[in-house]
Image (cartoon, rainbow, N blue to C red):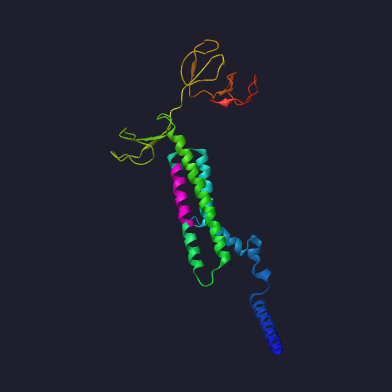
Amino acid sequence: MKNRLKLLTGTTIFLLVLAGVYVYACCGEPDTVDSQAASSGKTQADTAKTKTVDDPNSPEGLLKTAAKILGDAHKSNTPEARNALMTHSQKMLTKALEMVTKCNEMLAGDKPDTAAIVASNETALKLMKKAAELMEKYNTLLSRDAAKTPDERIWYVCPMNCSTADKPGKCPKCGMNLVKKEPAEKAIYACPMGCVAPVDKPGKCPKCGMNLVKKESSEKAVYACPMNCETSDKPGKCSKCGMNLEKK
């Protein structure tokens, strides 16, 4: 029995050596064959990973797109940004459900690949967590938008004044594209002497009694002390109490 094992082992080694010689003779040195790949500094695994990330429907591609959508949502609270958050979160949840379903099918097989199942479940979990993050951001932006007055919201109006909507599209009456109308800036009234922080209503300064002056939208932003010590046209600290000035 031992002699047979030795013979089998020796034969296997001999065949492996022959195979190595054959590959070397046909392909040459590995450095020569793969010189182009080596010069690019990428392995086949790296190339495959890059292709996966570039695929927008792959888990990696969905996560990459989610990061961009979140970045856009941080910059502006618009209907387009909110719709992108909700639509992409739905895509990610659908993909995660597909992966979990496939894992269950793999588990039902005769010889399930445990490592592949664990890796797939972890990726599905990442998708679900990121989808939850997108939905949370959506709810936050929606709540902020709901708290705005009609003058503060972004509207889309027909150039012919046929209709108004809160999202882009076409006028249902004349068919023209709706034009985005920026929200009107809130009027600010400030004391000419800078005694108190600006307010959103006309009146008199409670300290010096002077009439509050309306600040036009073209004027610089106003930064005020939370304790109403002073105001400034640029950010910084209050010269009296040391607190950070807040933009009004």
Q: Is residue 180 magenta?
A: no
Q: Identify the image quadrant of residue 30.
A: bottom right
Question: Could you tell me residue 36's position as x and y percent?
Answer: 63, 64
Question: Could you tell me residue 22's position as x and y percent?
Answer: 65, 80
Q: Residue furthest left?
A: 173
**Image quarter (top left, top right, bottom left or bottom right) of the N terminus:** bottom right
The answer, for residue 102, to whether it is visible in the render is yes
Q: Residue furthest top?
A: 209
Q: Which residues make up the magenta segment?
A: 82-96
Give me the residue at 57% from left, 66% from top.
114
Q: Where 55 sits versus 156, above or below?
A: below
What secondary structure do most residues of the magenta stretch adopt? helix
- In the image, 108 versus 25, the foreground residue is 108
Relative side of 230 to 90, left or right: right
Q: Where 124 sits versus 27, above or below?
A: above
Q: Where 111 sits versus 186, above or below?
A: below
Question: Could you tell me residue 72's position as x and y percent?
Answer: 51, 42
